[in-house]
């Protein structure tokens, strides 16, 4: 496997402000990190692909950054993805957003830090993954996903992007 990613086509007229886009960005990162942990991988490179459109003009770009240490922890990948997006977004409404991690390594060895308890964070996220695997992806969601701009609840009711 070379990378783990996930993307979503959006209703461009809804995603015009950063707080709305940030909700979807976080939901995509959660899904990417969950998949990476499922396959026992961590990624060293975070990529963000964006398609912007205002109905008349469109702009597509992809940017990536390297993490200090490979990770499949949501908060580390989300921080990098958010920085990438904010630094390169021109302000046009978003019609497609995709996140991926690459340069994958086995997750059996994790670099520890003095200021962040990565083992505890990893254990917490694996416990959340187990609950979602057992009871469905809608069993635990962030409160921000309940906002109008959230897509996680809608996706939880679908199979392969189609309603059950």
Image (cartoon, rainbow, N blue to C red):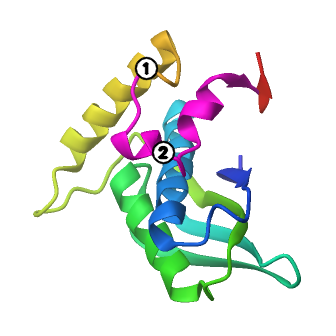
Q: Secondary structure at mark 2?
A: helix
* In this rendering, position of residue 159 left or right of residue 136: right
Magenta stretch encompasses residue 155: yes
Q: Which mark is residue 65?
A: none
Quarter of the C terminus within the rendering? top right
The image quarter in which residue 45 lies: bottom right
For the residues bearing labels 1 and 2, Cβ distance under 8 angstroms:
no
Magenta region, residue range: 139-160
Binning the other alpha carbons within 10 Å of mark 1 as few (below 14), some (14 to 19) or many (20 upward) gives few
Q: Which residue is located at x 30 percent, y 40 percent? A: 122
Q: Position of residue 14 (x, y in %)?
A: 64, 61
Q: Position of residue 149 (x, y in %)?
A: 54, 52
Can you say whether 155 is above or below 61 in the image? Answer: above
* In this rendering, position of residue 97 left or right of residue 135: right
Outermost residue toward the right in this view? 56
Q: Which residue is located at x 29 percent, y 57 percent? A: 111
Kindly tell me whether residue 95 is visible in this rendering: yes
The image quarter in which residue 48 lies: bottom right
Pointer 1 or 2: first along the chain: 2
Q: Which mark is residue 139?
A: 1
Outermost residue toward the left in this view? 114
Mark nearest the camera among 1 and 2 is 1
- Residue annotated with mark 2: 30
């Amino acid at each position: 496997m070379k990378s783990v990613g996930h993307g979503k086509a959006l209703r461009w007229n809804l995603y015009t402000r950063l707080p709305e886009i940030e909700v979807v960005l976080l939901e995509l990162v959660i899904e990417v990190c969950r998949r990476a942990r499922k396959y026992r991988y961590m990624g060293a490179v975070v990529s963000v692909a964006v398609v912007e459109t205002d109905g008349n003009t469109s702009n597509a770009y992809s940017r990536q950054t390297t993490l200090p240490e490979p990770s499949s922890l949501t908060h580390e990948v989300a921080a990098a993805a958010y920085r990438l997006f904010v630094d390169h977004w021109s302000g046009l409404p978003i019609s497609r957003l995709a996140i991926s991690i690459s340069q994958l390594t086995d997750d059996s060895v994790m670099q520890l830090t003095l200021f962040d308890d990565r083992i505890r964070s990893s254990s917490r996220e694996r416990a959340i993954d187990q609950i979602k695997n057992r009871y469905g992806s809608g069993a635990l969601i962030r409160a921000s996903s309940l906002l109008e701009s959230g897509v996680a609840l809608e996706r939880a009711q679908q199979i392969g992007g189609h309603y059950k």
